[in-house]
Amino acid sequence: MSDEANKGLLSPLRRKLLMGMAAVPAITMLPRTSFAQAPATSAINTTGLAVTDTEVTVGILHSATGTMAISETGSIEAEKLAIEQINAAGGVLGRKIKFIQEDGASDWPTFAEKAKKLLVNDKVAAIMGCWTSASRKAVLPVVEQYNGMLYYPTFYEGLEQSKNVIYTGQEATQQILAGLNWIAKEKGAKSFFFIGSDYIWPRTSNKIARKHVENVLKGKVVGEEYYPLGNTQFNSVINKIKLTKPDVIFTDVVGGSNVAFYKQLKAAGIDLSKQALLTISVTEDEIDGIGGENIAGAYACMKYFQSLDNPNNKAFVPAFKKMWGEKTVIGDVTQAAYLGPWLWKLTVEKAGSFDVDKIAAASPGVEFKGAPEGYVRIHENHHLWSKTRVGRAKLDGQFELIYETADLVEPDPFPKGYQ
Amino acid sequence: MFGDYSIGDLGSIFVMQGFAGLILFSVYVLMALGLAIIFGQMGVINMAHGEFMILGAYVTWMTSNFFQSYLPGLFSGYFFLAMILAFIASGALGMLVEWVLIRHLYKRPLDTLLATWGLSLMLQQAYRSVFGAREVGVELPQWMLGSLHVTDSIEVPINGVFVMCLTVLITISVAYVMYKSRWGRQVRAVVQNRIMAGAVGINTEKVDRYTFGLGCGIAGVAGSAFTMIGSTGPTSGQLYIVDTFLVVVFGGAASLVGTIASAFSISQTQSTLEFFMSGSMAKVLTLLAVVGILMLRPQGLFALKVRK
């Protein structure tokens, strides 16, 4: 639906004019608010946030150093791009966005401390940030206590909902169920082997996946294995996979372990064009480190792939590369991080105010038609309605879109029957 | 758990599992050798060992890129050159670090722990600034990918065989250098009695520098080899450091045989347990066993008998 709505907006001439501004559709959708006379600061900021007549300050809070910098760099880049594009299109309620970037340094107490600094000292109007669930859990009490607004980009395990957080990534059921349904139908898969890193996200995701396989798909989980974070030796579990011969290997291994797992899988002679493998933890970012030749043929279940063929994405990808370099790749979370500043802007304009309470109340129903993934809408539970997609990894490190759900999938952070 | 499988299946799985254990053993020996030399011979607790390995990995990555761009015809053989370059780069950096930092701390061995930990953080950030925060993918020549088909159900990963051969080669070289060469005798003399070694005309400073350089160089080769099985990123070195210390301490410092015996017992326990339970539980039990044994034998499996 979003595709059709956008087609008219992008005549070749206009596309040329607006190249470099992925924001195109959203800007044209909202001409009145964007270019109208800016309202008085006292009217739109009643709680003392850092809003002046010309500027509004937001915070970016990710790990630029430490272990998680590998993953969070993309999110920082996407958020800066979004802010730049919003400013180029006139800002928010006539005010340019200024950002203060803080480094969480891959350390969860540091995240909490920096969040407090951003809210208390800098009075930021919103925070774009966090990546791991651990960092979000550390920041959550802070944003709730000081009544801040956090836009959180990562797909995560669910089981959380807060007035002060907008979750722009998928919660677990949104990410997993449609992918399992597809592979069960497409490959006639009955037996599944789960392998994950040993922490909350893979364990919760696999718990949901197991219930779905056993109760809905009437299949069988023939193995469920966890390895410590950072494990580099997977030969034993690969032997177990060979012994149990599952129809599908379902993986949520993360970080450096990911690279080791796929390299060793390939070395053990498991051919991913014959053995179906469905992962929920490998995006284009990870393939950079894994190497396309080691993972080609695997299926990934995400909501966004860099290769998506729609007008929004065709403007977004070149703009991103122009800002951050030709070789940069864009993974699922990077796209979700890009949504954060945009959703915040749209919500502020809908609420007609920067006040956090008004934004929280106005969030449900906010739509972003310029999203590179197509179209998203904020649900009453502050998660996003979005499609689930399955892509197949190619040698060049990109995904080929194989399947997408016909409709937007409803976010369900507290799934009944899956706990 | 074995009821559902045929004898043939089980046979080949046990063969492959045995092989998995041997590969793990080679990986452990390879990553621990450099540290065994530095920690065992010099008493320096080198927390930056993992970062020296990753320097080797980055050198391999750069060599691979260079060959792809300028010498695509020779790409299939680049890995051997890359390992030599990795040895030189890590070794040179090791010697520099010894000269700037470590030599001032020989009398305060515990301080080397803090100093090298700081060094590891600096190196990580340096890699991040130079090579970017994201992991890089090291492309391997075609012949190093995939596996050897021994029978229909037994497949042996080529990278595993490669690591095993490399480990044997390096272990023999190190043993030769340490126990047969003139320089090795000097190293051991300095370890046993620095003042007397100096008195008989050994240049102890030079020996220290080259020993540290050798240890770091071997770490570089290990890092280069591990691009085949693991990730290459600014913090990847952290993945190895705990296991490395585990192997060296459990084996007993200052003993090459001890390091090998310890790598063997830890890797076999680990891979056998991994087959019967989940990876995390296998790790827990392995660590518990190591702790238990170290409580009974604090000096490690093999310790030099010295007169106190």
Image (cartoon, grey):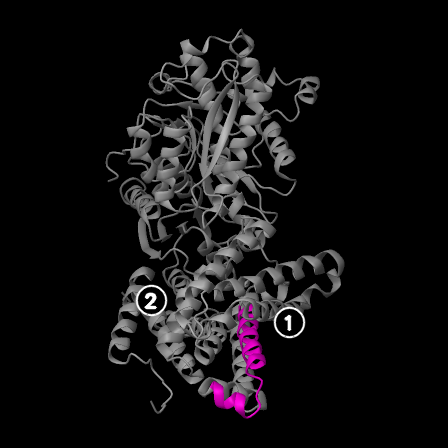
Is B185 in the magenta? no
Residue B187, compared with residue A81, is above or below; it is below
Asked where in the image residue A232 lies, by quadrant, the reply is: bottom left
> How crowded is the residue under tag 1: few (<14 C-alpha within 10 Å), some, or many (20+)?
some
Circle 2: residue type = Phe
User: Where's residue B38, x and y in %?
Assistant: 48, 75
User: Where's residue A369, x and y in %?
Assistant: 50, 20
Residue at the image position 70 percent from the left and 63 percent from the top: B75
Q: Which badge, 1 or 2, is on the more N-terminal residue?
A: 1
Residue at the image position 64 percent from the left and 27 percent from the top: A20
Image-based side of B268 in relation to A10, left or right: left
Q: Main secondary structure of the magenta part?
A: helix
Q: Foreground residue, B198 or A96?
A: B198
Image-based side of B108 in relation to B83, left or right: left
Q: Are marks 1 and 2 in contact (CB under 8 Å)?
A: no
Asked if residue A81 can be seen in this view, the reply is yes
Q: Which residues are magenta?
A: B194-222
Is B203 in the magenta? yes
Residue B275 badge: 2
Residue B84 badge: 1
